[in-house]
């Protein structure tokens, strides 16, 4: 039986605001899924979420959220395939430095003959229908991260890879590679020029430019032309709210 509700994809020309999930908590993830974000991303690279946590988090969120993305720890076809089999609708792949690496990531998301993903969508077929193998290519997205000088130099080649229709900038690693130290460095010419170069290239190729940000930076990133912007993360939001409550009471 085909699924009545295939997930929506990220498409160029629209804006998407998302939340990053770092905590291995189904309750926190479920709460985030009910707030109206356009996507949630489960961070298995730098977050505290293990493979053991992934399926329960997906189960807690997918009733309310169509776009459930996983940032995998590496450009590894085994972990990419496993996350998609578990029901993720897209993967963010870190440290993609070349067109060849981007192509390898895309092929890990695609069944033959377009790729080499192994057939066995255990939970994905339960969620998206028994015809998942036939329909997956229409909604599963591969999102390479642009976060090194090598990726910046290869940006046009990466964006030209078939199957790359979204990219995601890691500003902290990109800043490190530019010799600026971790974090965002708005106002530094090298940093500003790198972001502008990425957005301009995405516009030429019809690719969604995404970036990691926060609520303070998000309006600037949208003005710069980014279309997929992470505006919050669960740990940061919780810590900030707790600190505000404590300090507001202690120092009214």
Image (cartoon, rainbow, N blue to C red):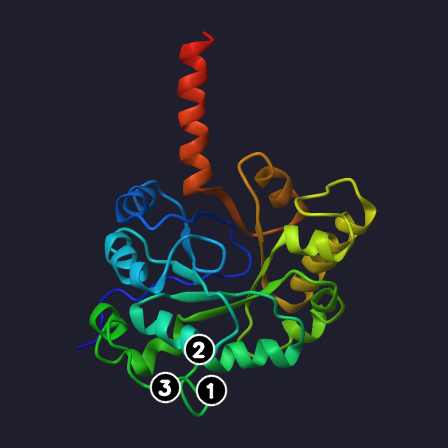
- Residue corresponding to mark 1: 115
- Residue corresponding to mark 2: 109
Q: Is residue 60 above or below residue 121?
A: above
Residue 45 image label: none
Quarter of the image with the C terminus is top left
Mark positioned earlier in the residue sequence (2 or 3): 2
Kindly check if marks 2 and 1 are in contact, taking CB atoms under 8 A apart as contact.
Answer: yes
Q: Is 102 placed left or right of 150 in the picture?
A: left
Give the spatial CA distance, label 2 vs label 3: 9 Å
- Residue corresponding to mark 3: 118
- Which label sits in the foreground, 2 or 3? 3
Residue farthest toward the right in the current orientation of the protein: 189
The local crowd at label 2, few if under 14, some if 14 to 19, many if 20 or more residues have their Cα within 10 Å, is: many
Q: Nearer the viewer, residue 201 or 154?
A: 154
Which percent across, then down, holds residue 227? 56, 52
Q: Secondary structure at mark 1?
A: loop
Task: Name the residue located 36 percent from the left edge and 60 percent from the top edge.
Answer: 50
The local crowd at label 1, few if under 14, some if 14 to 19, many if 20 or more residues have their Cα within 10 Å, is: some
The local crowd at label 3, few if under 14, some if 14 to 19, many if 20 or more residues have their Cα within 10 Å, is: some
Q: Secondary structure at mark 2?
A: helix
- Which label sits in the foreground, 3 or 1? 3
Residue farthest toward the bottom in the current orientation of the protein: 113
Q: Nearer the viewer, residue 35 or 42?
A: 42
Kindly check if marks 3 and 1 are in contact, taking CB atoms under 8 A apart as contact.
Answer: no
Mark positioned earlier in the residue sequence (2 or 1): 2
């Amino acid at each position: 039986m085909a699924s009545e509700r295939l997930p929506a994809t990220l498409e160029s020309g629209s804006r998407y605001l998302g939340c990053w999930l770092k905590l291995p908590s189904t309750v926190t993830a479920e709460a985030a899924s009910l707030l109206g974000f356009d996507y949630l991303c489960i961070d298995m690279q730098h977050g505290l979420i293990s493979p053991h946590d992934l399926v329960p988090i997906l189960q807690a969120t997918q009733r309310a959220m169509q776009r459930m993305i996983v940032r995998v720890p590496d450009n590894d076809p085994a972990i990419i395939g496993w996350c998609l089999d578990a029901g993720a609708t897209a993967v963010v792949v870190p440290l993609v430095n070349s067109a060849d690496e981007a192509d390898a990531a895309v092929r890990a998301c695609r069944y033959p003959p377009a790729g080499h993903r192994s057939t066995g969508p255990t939970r994905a077929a339960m969620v998206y229908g028994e015809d998942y193998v036939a329909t997956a290519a229409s909604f599963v997205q591969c999102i390479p991260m642009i976060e090194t000088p090598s990726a910046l130099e290869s940006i046009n080649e990466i964006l030209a890879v078939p199957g790359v229709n979204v990219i995601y900038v890691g500003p902290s690693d990109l800043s490190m590679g530019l010799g600026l130290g971790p974090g965002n460095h708005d106002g530094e010419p090298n940093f500003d020029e790198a972001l502008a170069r990425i957005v301009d290239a995405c516009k030429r190729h019809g690719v969604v430019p995404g970036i990691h940000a926060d609520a303070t930076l998000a309006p600037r990133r949208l003005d710069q032309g980014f279309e997929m912007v992470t505006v919050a993360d669960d740990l940061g939001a919780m810590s900030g709210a707790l600190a505000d409550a404590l300090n507001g009471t202690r120092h009214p």
